[in-house]
């Protein structure tokens, strides 16, 4: 991957929750190449989720460079960052952020309603949703039409992953996406997630406290090694 350009470039990035509080993140430099699969490890409260939210434009840094796919997010207003995220990024949130009153299928296809770019890549949304769910070991007509609130936590986690993957985003950001899965299902899930990213050349940024997963990735980063802030919690 040496000849590939960076899709994520971070420089002199600082973030604190509000003025007067200590820095949560203070990162001098971080670059991630197109198509790379990066594992970021850190303890609870180390700033992992905050870093992912900054990469996705959910949060805005206090200062520094945050260049994603050639666009400087720090120059964008909130609505512009939201539109950019909808078009280019898939996000598996730690708390899933699924809509409980929608069916499994409708949750997965939801991003296509907010991005013409992603929608243009999917000729048949429901069939693509079914394919992704089946690939993530979640299939059957009965379960797909049920409200997502009726699913187990592990099943909801896989629905959230399918939703993040639909429309072939350039970058997939995953925040502890295997926390509710047992060992066997966790390993199968990781392999399937990587397979989907390989098929669409999606860059994967995967955060977890579980060090046993790092062997699946191209590169492993310990957040404590690059974060100069002495964060006491997120």
Image: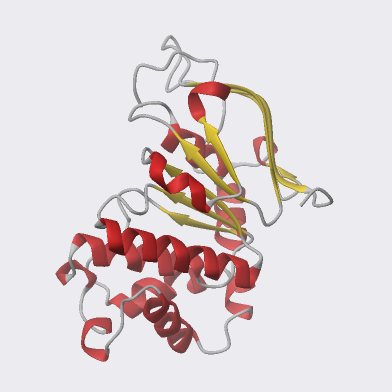
Residue shown at 58% from the left, 77% from the top? 119
- The percent position of residue 59, horizontal first and vertical second, equals 50, 37
Where residue 86 appears, as percent x and y from the top left, is: 55, 60
Q: Note whether residue 84 is visible.
A: yes
Name the spot of residue 135 as percent of width and height, x first.
42, 77
Task: Tell me the quarter of the image containing the C terminus.
Answer: top left
Q: Is residue 142 above or below residue 98?
A: below
Residue at 72 percent of width and 50 percent of height: 69
Where 22 sits versus 221, above or below? above
Which of 127 and 181 lies nearest the eye of the viewer? 181
Rendering quarter of residue 83: bottom right
Q: Quadrant of residue 169?
A: bottom right
At horizontal 50% and vertical 72% (from top left) the residue drawn is: 166
Question: What residue is rendered at 17% in x and 65% in y?
Answer: 152
Q: Residue furthest left?
A: 150
Q: Is residue 120 left or right of residue 130?
A: right
């Amino acid at each position: 991957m040496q000849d590939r350009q960076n899709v994520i470039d971070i420089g002199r990035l600082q973030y604190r929750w509000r003025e007067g509080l200590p820095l949560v993140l203070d990162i001098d430099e971080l670059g991630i190449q197109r198509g790379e699969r990066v594992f970021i490890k850190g303890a609870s409260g180390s700033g992992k989720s905050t870093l992912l939210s900054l990469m996705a434009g959910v949060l805005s840094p206090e200062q520094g460079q945050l260049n994603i796919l050639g666009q400087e997010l720090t120059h964008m207003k909130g609505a512009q960052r939201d539109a950019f995220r909808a078009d280019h990024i898939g996000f598996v949130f730690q708390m899933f952020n699924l809509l409980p009153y929608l069916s499994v299928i409708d949750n997965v296809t939801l991003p296509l309603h907010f991005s013409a770019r992603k929608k243009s890549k999917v000729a048949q949304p429901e069939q693509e949703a079914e394919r992704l769910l089946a690939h993530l070991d979640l299939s059957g007509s009965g379960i797909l039409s049920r409200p997502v609130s009726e699913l187990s936590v592990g099943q909801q986690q896989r629905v959230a992953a399918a939703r993040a993957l639909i429309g072939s985003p350039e970058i997939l950001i995953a925040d502890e996406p295997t926390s509710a899965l047992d060992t066997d299902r966790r390993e199968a899930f990781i392999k399937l997630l990587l397979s989907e990213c390989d098929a669409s050349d999606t860059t994967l940024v995967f955060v977890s406290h579980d060090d046993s997963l790092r062997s699946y990735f191209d590169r492993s980063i310990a957040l404590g090694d690059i974060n100069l802030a002495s964060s006491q919690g997120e």
